[in-house]
Image (tube, rainbow, N blue to C red):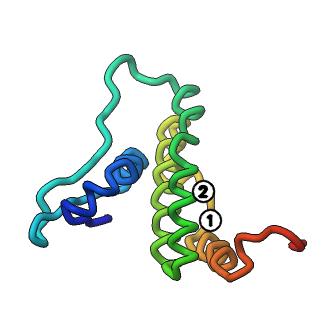
Amino acid sequence: MSTYSVAEAKSRLSELIERAMGGEPVVITRHGRPVVELKAVAQQGRPMTAAEALLGLGEGRRSIVVRAMAAAEAGDVDGATEVIMRRVRAEEQIIDRILGLAPGGVDLAGSAGVIRAMLEVWSRPSGGDYAGRS
């Protein structure tokens, strides 16, 4: 869960909306006390078909990955891992439900350790430079 003061939220509103739409809890505080939680509004209209739900899973991934990579580069590899794993586990749950599998039937990323290791490599000084990598 991310927590921001009213002043921070005002200056970063677009980013916070993207985070909330990506499923991340965003809490706004006033004088250090939580007063508002941003969350995505459930879409109205007809229910999605299984195919539409599967095709829509990629929405919002880019912003989550960019945010996680930035956190890893800033030294917060654990926080970055949590952001990605939260999204991956949510997608796994959606796929489980669509396919009628028992919870935990789909494993898209393996353990958090795998994601953490990738983020650790990314956060190294040459991590963002693909030149010369094998």
In the picture of the structure, the residue carrying the numbered disc 2 is 107
Residue count near mark 1 (Cα–Cα under 10 Å), binned few <14, some 14–19, many ≥20: few
Give the number of the disc on residue 51. none
- Answer with left or right where residue 17 lies relative to residue 63: left
Q: Is residue 65 above or below residue 115?
A: above
| Residue drawn at (56%, 71%) of the image | 112
Residue 115, position in %: x, y?
61, 70
x, y percent for residue 99: 55, 36
Residue 7 position, x and y percent, is 21, 62
Identify the element where label 1 is drawn.
loop
Q: How many C-alpha atoms fall within 10 Å of the one at disc 2: few (<14), some, or many (≥20)? A: some
Q: Is residue 62 left or right of residue 21?
A: right
Towards the viewer: 104 or 122: 122
Total labels: the figure holds: 2
Marks 1,2: beta carbons within 8 A: yes
Which residue is at a point 27% across and 63% down the rendered structure image? 8
In the rendered image, which quarter contains the C terminus? bottom right
Residue under the point 46% across and 51% down: 90
Mark-to-mark CA distance, 1 and 2: 6 Å
Q: Position of residue 15 (x, y in %)?
A: 40, 52
Disc sitting over residue 110 in the figure: 1
Q: Amino acid at mark 2?
A: Asp
The N terminus - image quarter: bottom left
Residue at 35% across / 53% down in the picture?
16
Q: Secondary structure at mark 2?
A: loop
- Amino acid, disc 1: Gly
Quadrant assignment, res 110: bottom right
